Amino acid sequence: MNWWKICAVALSRGVIPACSVLLFANIPVVYAQQPGEFSAAEKAHLQDIAELGEQIFDIQEKYHLKVIYRAFPSVSGPRLRFEPAVPTDYAFLKSYLRILEEEWEKYPPEFWHQRPLEKVYLVKKLFYNKVATEGFAINSKKVIMLDFLRSRKSLLQQRHNLHHEI
């Protein structure tokens, strides 16, 4: 995806004047109208945000749930600790979302209609009762929390955990 497509996506959501703040995939980003107004690092960051936004949109549409990786509603407590993703995590997060899609596609559509799941929180450094955990369900809130960084060195473990939590 090039920067022109990023701008087109931004403009398709409404007319946005140059140098205004754009909330794209829940991240405030400065938007500019001319190619020379972005540095190479800014272009890469915007591309990561756009790709992440597209992946999340596709998952949300397919499974009829909300995927959250920043700005979490109040779910933490004295026994639950986690951190949100930051821009340096986006490459790992995009990779994790690809794995999530591959594994969840193995379930029939009827499974997702019967599963009382409304939200998936993608977090890092997830702990419950001071014990590191790959993820867990909060059934009363219809939420699954997944630590997208915990087993990043083991794709097999990540895939297993995705099935375990649903």
Image (tube, grey):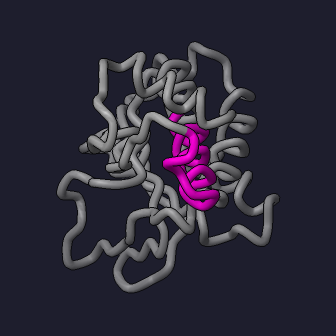
**Rendered image quadrant of residue 66:** top left
Residue 67: in magenta span? no
Depth order, front residue of 156/85: 85
Residue ID at (50%, 37%): 34
Residue ID at (37%, 71%): 82
Q: Which corner quadrant holds the N terminus? A: top right
Q: Which stretch is magenta? A: 35-53
Residue 41: in magenta span? yes
**Rendered image quadrant of residue 108:** top right
Left or right of residue 39: residue 13:
left
Residue ID at (28%, 54%): 71
Q: Which residue lies furthest to the bottom in this view?
A: 130
Depth order, front residue of 96/7: 7
Left or right of residue 61: residue 66:
left
- Where in the figure is residue 77, as x and y percent of width and height? 20, 71
Residue ID at (43%, 54%): 145
- Where in the figure is residue 76, as x and y percent of width and height? 24, 66
Q: Which corner quadrant holds the C terminus? A: top right
**Rendered image quadrant of residue 19:** top left
Q: How many labels does the image show?
A: 0
Q: Main secondary structure of the magenta part?
A: helix
Depth order, front residue of 20/9: 20
- Where in the figure is residue 30, as x and y percent of width and height? 36, 48
